[in-house]
Image (cartoon, rainbow, N blue to C red):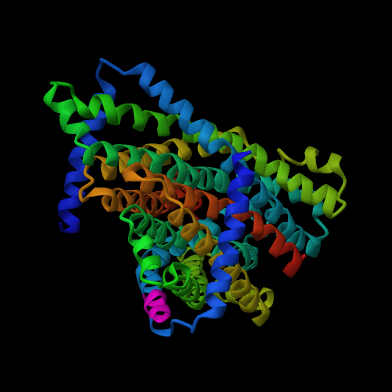
């Protein structure tokens, strides 16, 4: 199928999903169950990825600030970078890799085992029952994981700055909020929410239209991760420009 | 408990691959084919990703240094954060997402269709036949991908700094030249080779020990990308500390 037809089908699919998200009846318990699963499954990976990134930020940031003798501003740089950029992006990468790909695999397996067709035959709205709760799950899980990631990134920076490089701990905590405003935290969470929505839609789209047996499920998972990450990194640039207004 | 079993199994897998690689003749044609597939098929996404990572680095660097009056330092920020850290890890993440998941799902499908057993029956060593070419291919091609992504990233952050943020282009370039040296290219290549080895071994491992059925293939593909991402980002800190610390 050509790329344009894919895009059109995705648009129709997304519109169907969003319409069902806005109108009752809602599968609240299913949505809660999926949200819980994604959050739990991504929790440790998010910490394990963002924590070393905070450490690296501190390592390289100290090199810059050593030039001006402004080491005290290290924690400000780490918190700005983590809240605005690193944590939303990395948490969403992990949501796509762990949560989104699991959803694509589940829906793909249901599709090729004809469970989705069975649902439709029984007169049940397959998108409302199978897809909407999963999209809601990534939508809610992404900002929660973003918060977890932000905290672990700041702790990672703390570990390197204080224990490895011997900067004073009090100064690290005191300057943490120097450059960071509440709007940064909200902006980061907003970005993560948008990314979560995109990931959920892309993952469920890939899984829902899987063809070609077990190999097809593998392809759907692959496409979910690749297309999901590419899409939200492109969207990220426009969101960052709009939210944190950087016009010279 | 199960984690330790998996780690032990992974270690045995690595030993088996190493032994098979050293005792058989090198699969030159298959390795080049694998390198071509990994390189060419990951390149378009990598260019897109590194373009937009570069734009965002410039935006965030500008925002971070504005309160200090150091807007002109964006070039230095991009060189330090982008070239040394973001480019290798972003390339690793995307290659794990694209080529790694492909390896995992291809090998998992072979496992559940009993093609791997068929290879053993025909007295072809499956580690040598399936893993060695992919390993050689990813090691050949990943440093090149990383260097391409470094240049894309610099180009896009230069464009954003000059056209969107209105900074001085010459100043940007001279900061980049002051901050970067040839060693940065060597170090990013070292990093990307280490990441490539991890991605390949982890993805092939999960594919090799996939559980049966379509769910098994999905789960193997899923696990391979998450585990590679976690291992690469932890290793990234260790390597940064060793190389730049």
- Residue at figure coordinates x 79%, y 65% from the top left: A67
Provide residue A223's location: percent of width, then percent of height: 33, 53
* Whole-percent x, y for residue B112 in the image: 34, 52
Relative placement, left or right, of B172 versus A96 is right
Say if the magenta span includes residue B167.
no
Instruction: Tell me which residue sits at (35%, 49%) in the image.
Output: A221
Which residue occupies 44% across, 27% down? Answer: A35
Image quadrant in which the C terminus of chain B is located: bottom right
- Name the foreground residue: B200 vs B9: B9
Q: How many marks?
A: 0
Rendered location of residue B89, percent (x, y): 56, 61
Find out whether residue B32 is within the magenta segment.
yes
User: Which image quarter: residue A65?
Assistant: bottom right
Q: Is residue B62 visible?
A: no
Q: Quadrant of residue A146?
A: top right
Q: Where is residue B100 shown, x and y percent of the image?
A: 44, 60
Between B97 and B80, the one lying in front of the other is B97
Q: Is residue B203 visible?
A: yes
Q: Is residue A74 left or right of residue B175?
A: right
**Vertical placement of B89 versus A29: above or below?**
below
Vertical placement of residue B170 versus B117, above or below: below
Span of residues in magenta? B30-36
Viewed as shown, does residue B240 lie left or right of A244?
right
């Amino acid at each position: 199928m050509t790329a344009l037809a894919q895009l059109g089908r995705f648009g129709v699919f997304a519109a169907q999903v969003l319409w069902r998200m806005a109108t009752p009846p809602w599968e609240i318990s299913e949505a809660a169950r999926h949200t819980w699963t994604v959050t739990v499954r991504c929790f440790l990976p998010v910490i394990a990825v963002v924590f070393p990134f905070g450490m690296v930020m501190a390592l390289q940031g100290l090199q810059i600030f050593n030039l001006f003798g402004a080491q005290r501003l290290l924690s400000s740089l780490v918190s700005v970078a983590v809240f605005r950029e690193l944590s939303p992006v990395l948490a969403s990468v992990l949501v796509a890799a762990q949560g989104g790909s699991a959803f694509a695999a589940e829906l793909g397996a249901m599709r090729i085992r004809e469970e989705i067709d069975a649902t439709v035959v029984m007169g049940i709205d397959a998108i409302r029952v199978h897809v909407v709760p999963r999209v809601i799950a990534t939508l809610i899980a992404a900002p929660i994981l973003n918060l977890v990631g932000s905290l672990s990134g700041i702790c990672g920076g703390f570990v390197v700055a204080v224990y490895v490089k011997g900067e004073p701990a009090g100064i690290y905590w005191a300057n943490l909020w120097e450059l960071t405003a509440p709007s940064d935290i909200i902006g980061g969470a907003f970005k993560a929410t948008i990314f979560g929505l995109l990931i959920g839609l892309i993952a469920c789209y890939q899984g829902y239209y899987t063809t070609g047996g077990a190999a097809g499920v593998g392809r759907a998972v692959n496409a979910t991760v690749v297309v999901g990450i590419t899409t939200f990194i492109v969207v990220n640039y426009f969101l960052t420009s709009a939210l944190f207004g950087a016009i010279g | 408990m199960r984690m330790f079993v998996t780690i032990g199994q992974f270690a045995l897998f690595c030993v088996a691959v190493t032994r098979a690689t050293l005792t058989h003749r090198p699969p030159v044609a298959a390795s080049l084919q694998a390198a071509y597939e990994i390189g060419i098929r990951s390149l378009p996404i990598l260019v897109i990703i590194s373009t937009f990572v570069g734009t965002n680095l410039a935006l965030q660097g500008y925002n971070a240094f504005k309160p200090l009056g150091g807007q002109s330092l964006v070039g230095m920020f991009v060189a330090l954060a982008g070239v040394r850290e973001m480019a290798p890890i972003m390339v690793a993440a995307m290659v794990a997402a694209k080529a790694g998941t492909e390896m995992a799902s291809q090998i998992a499908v072979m496992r559940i269709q009993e093609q791997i057993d068929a290879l053993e029956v025909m007295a072809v060593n499956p580690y040598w036949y399936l893993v060695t070419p992919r390993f050689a291919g990813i090691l050949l091609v990943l440093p090149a991908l990383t260097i391409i992504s470094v240049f894309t990233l610099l180009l896009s952050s230069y464009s954003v700094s000059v056209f969107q943020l209105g900074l001085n282009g010459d100043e940007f370039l001279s900061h980049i030249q002051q901050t970067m040296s040839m060693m940065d290219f060597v170090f990013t290549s070292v990093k990307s080779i280490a990441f490539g080895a991890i991605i390949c071994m982890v993805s092939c491992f999960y594919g090799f020990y996939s559980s049966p059925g379509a769910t098994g293939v999905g789960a193997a593909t899923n696990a391979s990308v998450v585990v590679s991402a976690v291992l690469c980002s932890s290793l990234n800190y260790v390597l940064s500390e060793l190389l730049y610390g």
